[in-house]
Amino acid sequence: MNKDEFPEIITAKHIASYLGISLRRVYELFQTYPSAGGIPNFQIGASIRVDSKDFFEWIDARKQKKAK
């Protein structure tokens, strides 16, 4: 799935598929504070969702951190 094809609100499955990591690892990143490298997210009932804009900003921040 291309970055432009993502819906505005995405799930752990979208993230796992895009990054090529396990769902378990995505949920671990959800449990980590964004300031400590976790993926910014929010809950709707028992479901965890992510704003796709926040997700791609998170990826860009990881890339910049690695480049330094």
Image: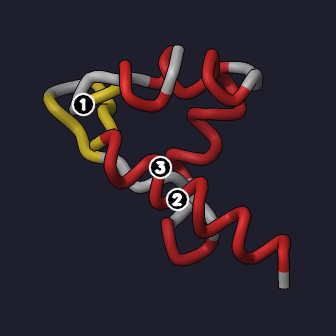
The amino acid sitting under disc 1 is Ile
Q: Which mark is residue 9?
A: 1
The answer to which of 35 and 55 lies nearer the viewer is: 55
Q: Residue at 23% across / 38% down in the picture?
A: 43
Give the alpha-carbon distance from disc 3 to disc 2, as whole Å.
Answer: 5 Å
Vertical relation: 61 (above or below) 14: below
Indicate which disc, 1 or 3, sits on the residue closer to the N terminus: 1
Residue 31 in the figure: left or right of residue 64: left
How many neighbours does mark 2 have within 10 angstroms: few (below 14), some (14-19), or many (20 or more)? some
Instruction: Indicate the secondary structure of the residue bearing disc 2.
Output: helix
The amino acid sitting under disc 3 is Phe
Q: Which mark is residue 56?
A: 3
| Quadrant of res 23 | top right
The amino acid sitting under disc 2 is Trp
Place of residue 28 in the rendered image (x, y in percent of width and height, measured from the top left):
64, 41
Query: Mark 2 — residue?
Result: 58
Question: Answer yes or no: do the residues labelled 3 and 2 have beta carbons within 8 Å?
Answer: yes
